Image (cartoon, rainbow, N blue to C red):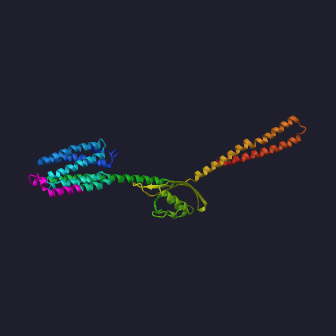
Amino acid sequence: MLKTWNKIVSLWNKLIGSETFFSMENRLYNLVCVIAIAILLLLLGNNLLIHLWRSAFITLIVFALQIVFYYYARFKKRFYKSILLNAAISYAALCFNFFVNSGSNGPTLFIFFLTFQLLIAITPNKMHVVWMLFHIVTVSALLVIERMHPEIVKNYYTDANDRMVDFIYTYIVSLVFIHVIVRHLKNYMQRQKQQKEADAMKLKAVFESSDSVHIFLDKNLKVLYFNRSAADFFYRMYNKIIRNEMDIRQLLHPVYISDFEENFKQVLKGKKIKEDRLLTYCDSVNIWWHISYIPVIDDSENIIGVSLVASDITETRLQQESIRRKNESLLKIAHIQSHEIRHPVTNILGIMELIKINGYEHAAEYIALMELAVLNLDNKIKEVVEQTNAAQKET
């Protein structure tokens, strides 16, 4: 049973296209085409049964064209072109059917309502006014023509029973189509809602597990969302509880408010801002912050607020400062070794060379000079040792 159901689902997805490769509108159009082909086939049989030969001929033509439209939309992926051609043919067929199938006494007007609903369901919003005006003008024109020239409207019903059967059949077809369209849209919206809720849960989980402070503000600096890290920080530093709809300036460091407001104005103009800032809190707690201001944009490309992300980078900054001081110590050691130690060593070597040349008669004088050079060398060595110890402490 399960395998049979899976085969049916697989066949159905092949007929209307998968959500991965087809848009909701395209899949809905493919779905309607498939149902329309089946219903037109039944309608053709109904027209033949009650001897509506002209309606049967029109139905046969529309049936064949519907197959072509479906083929182009489903397999050639020429979705909008297929819709426009289908709409044009449908209008022509409905207008013709209006005159050959009893005009306003026939069921054609029902199908106009059905066509309108289908078109507004699968076309962009900007086209809806066009379809509405076109339907109003077309149906009004048909009714006016029927009123002024009733002789051109043909009544081919053999008796009242045929008219009743035709109306019931068209009514049922319209209900089926409306149900299919509404059900498809409802299911699609439900899936979209579930997907958005799942994405929101994942995003919230990411924010809540982050050590960074995340705050979403509206254009009036009101808090719309904050994560746990933000709540914990403000309570720890200020003993304040952050709440939705609260003005964020009530929680900011007083020194930072002015710069914050200026940055906020720039972000509302579409600019992204990142900065590092050192702030001192109570009990002389110094914190380095990396602060990002990001404009939040809706589906209509309008800026609706600002996302504020603040990360504590104090440890990183301290490490960078430690490395900087260590590098300075190493550079100073290198300078002492390459320049300052070389000078007393050169002096000692020179004095020893003089002793060798002049003998030891003047050794006392030379030894005094050598002692001075050795003391100078000893001082430089001590300075190297101090710098080395400082570098080791930084490490």
Q: What number of labels is visible?
A: 0
In the rendered view, tell whether residue 147 sits above or below residue 60.
Answer: below
Residue 394 screen position, x and y as percent: 65, 49
Quadrant for the N terminus in the image: top left
* Res 173 visible: yes
Q: Residue furthest right?
A: 361
Q: Is 146 on the left-hand or right-hand side of 76? A: left
Residue 21 screen position, x and y as percent: 34, 44
Q: Residue furthest top?
A: 357
Residue in the picture at 86% in, 43% down: 368
Query: For residue 215: magenta?
Result: no
Magenta-colored segment: predominant secondary structure: helix
Residue 165 screen position, x and y as percent: 13, 53
* Res 215 visible: no
52 or 374: nearer the viewer = 52
Q: Is 154 on the left-hand or right-hand side of 344? A: left
Residue 77 screen position, x and y as percent: 31, 43
198 or 110: nearer the viewer = 110
In the rendered view, tell whether residue 332 sits above or below residue 254.
Answer: above
| Quarter of image, res 5 | top left
Q: State which region is magenta.
A: 136-164
